[in-house]
Amino acid sequence: MRLRTFESFWLLKNGLLYTYPSVQKNISTEIVVIGGGITGALTAHALMDKGYKVTLIDKRDIGQGSSSATTSMLQYEIDVPLSELSNMIGSYAAAQCYKAGIVAIKKLEQLVKENKIDCGFEKKESLYLAHSEKAAQSLKEEFEIRNKCELGVMWLQAEEISKTYGLKSYGGILSQTAASIDAYKLAHELIHYNAGRGMNVYDQTELIDFDFGPKKTTITSSEGHKISCKKAIFCSGFESTKMIKEDVAKLFYTYACVSEKGIKIPKKLKNTLVWDTNEPYLYLRTTDDGRLLVGGEDSSVNFPFFQQQIKESKTSKLIQTLGEILPDVKFIEDFSWGGTFGTTKDGLPYIGKSPEFEHALFVLSFGGNGITFSIQAMDIIVDLLEGKPNELADYYRFGR
Ligand SMILES: Cc1cc2nc3c(=O)[nH]c(=O)nc-3n(C[C@H](O)[C@H](O)[C@H](O)COP(=O)(O)OP(=O)(O)OC[C@H]3O[C@@H](n4cnc5c(N)ncnc54)[C@H](O)[C@@H]3O)c2cc1C
């Protein structure tokens, strides 16, 4: 008998940190940010820093979307390898997108430090493993290209990886810049901080209708209240795909689980994010409370009625695959969960104006490193509002 559905580890660990009132009257503001996940939290923070009058709304409580399910590995590496992305958008542009990821991780480190935000931020390295001999050949080529672009990479042989990390592989790329966080906590703390400096925050407030104009936008909530503003910025996550006709992302379901605390793993593995070339890829990271987190097993199948059973079989598969590549570690499952995930054709996000909604802005940080894209959006959105050119905005544009 199933008395409850499953919840993500971060939600259970942190609980509901802060709640806010819902909109109960018509209001007027300068900018409305729709979505109180990590993207909305970072975007709103950047806007508050610039002195805009900001109102943030969410139809759920804060952080209850993908930001509570995410495994929060911060990587400069995009799901699409640099070599492939270069073929799609040109080698200069592709290198700029990769480099922007490095800048973003450093920017977040600074932000967390300056504002003393307790969100488990840990600087790490990232290890991209070849899962087969064939994959090792193309990964070596990928390494050469990344090395030429000075992305701070080293090639490690399989023997060295096994000795240092206890991982079985066919070699891999070690990257210097990476980090991990608790995105749920970060989103909550950032929104709370900005509420303290004058941002209006409303949870349980769903946008159901809008009227976008060049000078004025009016948003209607499910309870019929109107919010008028100069600009609406959609940070509404994967659900945004319902309002946009452009085929921006392919959605599927993905799974993750964490071990009990105090798992014994090689010392170097504690400070390293790991992912592999398999499809779908397996990934690992440690948490700041001494657990090992493993994720992957993406699937396009998501029958709500069988969610619990599917999650259990996906978790068993994750632990089995982990045992194959990390044979000397005893992983005892503590929590497991699943969540919707989306990828784009080139691994890049969609940030800016959609031709379908000329007067609104969107931050759709899809892909394996969605959070790194959300950090990049902080500068992009401010530049777009101020009418300044932004190179990344061009690579991340709608209609590309
Ligand atoms: C299992 C899993 C693992 C992942 N691992 C990683 C990882 O390691 N690294 C990484 O970078 N990314 C990862 N991701 C992706 C990452 O979770 C997302 O990129 C990120 O959480 C997106 O944040 P968001 O704020 O855009 O979306 P969300 O957190 O979903 O926030 C959007 C918010 O908008 C609100 N909303 C939607 N529609 C409306 C409306 N009409 N009115 C009002 N509010 C609305 C929702 O309630 C929601 O709170 C992972 C995702 C999953 C599921």
Image (cartoon, rainbow, N blue to C red):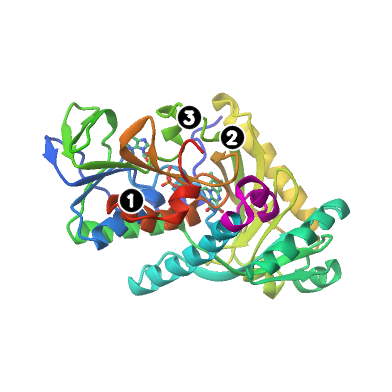
Residue contact between numbered discs 1 and 2, judged by CB atoms under 8 Å = no
Q: CA distance from mark 1 to mark 2?
A: 31 Å
Q: Residue at the location (63% across, 68% down)?
A: 151
Disc 3 or disc 1, which is closer to the eye? 1
Q: Which residue is mark 3?
A: 246
Q: Is residue 24 left or right of residue 315?
A: left
Chief secondary structure of the magenta portion: helix
Q: Which residue is mark 1?
A: 384
Read off the magenta span.
77-93
Residue contact between numbered discs 2 and 3, judged by CB atoms under 8 Å = no
Q: Is residue 347 left or right of residue 207?
A: right
328 versus 209 height, above or below: below
Q: Which residue is mark 2?
A: 252
Q: Earlier in the sequence, mark 1 or mark 2?
A: 2
Count residues near mark 1 (Cα–Cα under 10 Å), then give few for <14, some for 14-19, many for 20+.
some
Residue 286: x and y in percent read: 60, 63
Q: Secondary structure at mark 2?
A: strand
Amino acid identity at mark 2: Phe
393 versus 189 height, above or below: above
Q: Nearer the viewer, residue 54 or 272?
A: 54
